[in-house]
Image (tube, helix red, strand yellow):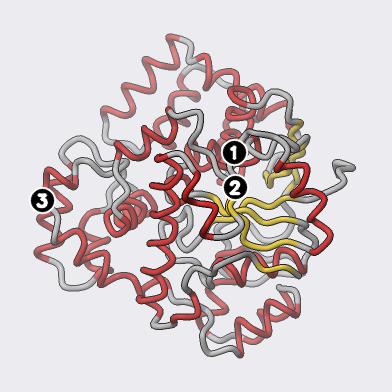
Amino acid sequence: LSGADYCIVVLSGSFVQRGEAACMDKYTRAGWAVKAGADLVLELPSVYAVASAERFALGGIRTLLGTGVVTDLAFGCEAADVDTLYRLCEVLVSEPPSFRSALHRHLSLGKSYPRARYDALADIGAPEEMLHALAQPNNILAIEYLRAIGAYAPGIRPVPVTRVGGGYHAETLTGTYSSATAIRKALLSGDESVLNAMPSFVGGAMLYDPQFPIRPECVGPLILYAIRSMSARSLAELPDVSEGFENILSRAARRCSTIDEFWESVKSKRFTLARCRRIGICALLGITNEQVHATVRDAKSEYLKVLAMTSGARTLLSEIAKRPHAPLILRNADITACPAIVQRNLTTDAFSTDVLAVAAQNETHRDAEGPLIL
């Protein structure tokens, strides 16, 4: 699609953007990405991985920008017409007074930010194609990639990849390309028909290796414990907590005996289930607003933690190493020379991996000394 010489993947670590544990450890997934054609796989810092679409996209762009070699960014989207996505970006970035006023009005009604944003655009007479594009989950993230490129990396060319097959939230396997939701559901139920929806080197391991898939609920008791152990004041310092939500979290954690009961108790139109789950993961990992703001604010907060690579990617690494954009982390010894904010975020990444290893009761999921080389 891009004609690039190399493919670099930025991969979430032990916890992912939907606010859950990943289905398998990060090194296994990174190795599979290399087998599927990637040359180099970098870890997306946890402060970005467990975040809203805006911060998730920002983290991906800043990580790639830190390599100093990226020319193109490929990302999935629902809309074949990228011009519509650009037009949406223009409105969302410029925030005309009419849009801003409508947005504040809908937020005051207790709506989630995505819902309020959609309704505000409808109020100001946005064209139907723009509203349709914004309603698609994959487009929401695509728009945030475009915004981040415009703000931080205007030299990177967007390469949108149109989604085919099952819809984003489809729960049943369909044809050649099924949704990630459907694949996860089939894996967790042991449905062997899922083998047709994945590469053979992934499907076989996921179905027949007893250590996979890691079940999202394994971290539930740890999240509930973490929230119970925090004061309302400490909960207020977590990302995405606002409007007194810390008090709701605190009361529910002491009242509920299971994580599912807890999620049902705290979620609402304003605080969606995914948002609540991300808050829970941040509580578990100790990620605070202060850490997030320090990371976003600091121009030297990027780092390149290599999870996996091909043997042929050494030339690419040599090119990256020549450019003083962000520290390259190949082994633990590389961490000591990094800026304080990088060391702090790497510590969070390592802790998240250890937490998942404990929750999954599998020590092989812990951080490795160096990347996989395939």
- Residue drawn at the location 67% of the way across and 63% of the way down: 308
Q: Nearer the viewer, residue 321 or 150?
A: 321
Q: Are marks 2 and 1 in contact (CB under 8 Å)?
A: yes
Neighbour tally class for label 3: few under 14, some 14-19, many 20 plus, Cα within 10 Å? few
Please report the residue visible at 60 percent of the width from the left and 81 percent of the height from the top.
206
Secondary structure, mark 2, is strand
> Where is 221 relative to 54, above or below?
below
Image location of residue 352, percent across then percent down: 40, 62
Question: Where residue 284 sits: x, y (%)?
Answer: 29, 59
Residue 304's label in the rendered image is: 2
Disc 3 residue type (three-letter) = Ser
Disc on the earlier residue, 2 or 3: 3
Tell me the amino acid under the disc marked 1. Answer: Ala
Dots 2, 3 in contact, CB < 8 A: no
Amino acid type at circle 2 is: Leu
- Measured in 3D between alpha carbons, the distance from the residue under mark 2 to the one under mark 3, in whole angstroms, is 35 Å
Query: Which quadrant of the structure image shows residue 113?
Result: top left
- The circle on residue 326 is 1
Residue 265 versus residue 224: which sits nearer the camera? 224
Q: Give me the disc on residue 231.
A: 3
Quarter of the image containing the C terminus?
bottom right
Mark 1 and mark 3: Cα distance apart in space: 36 Å
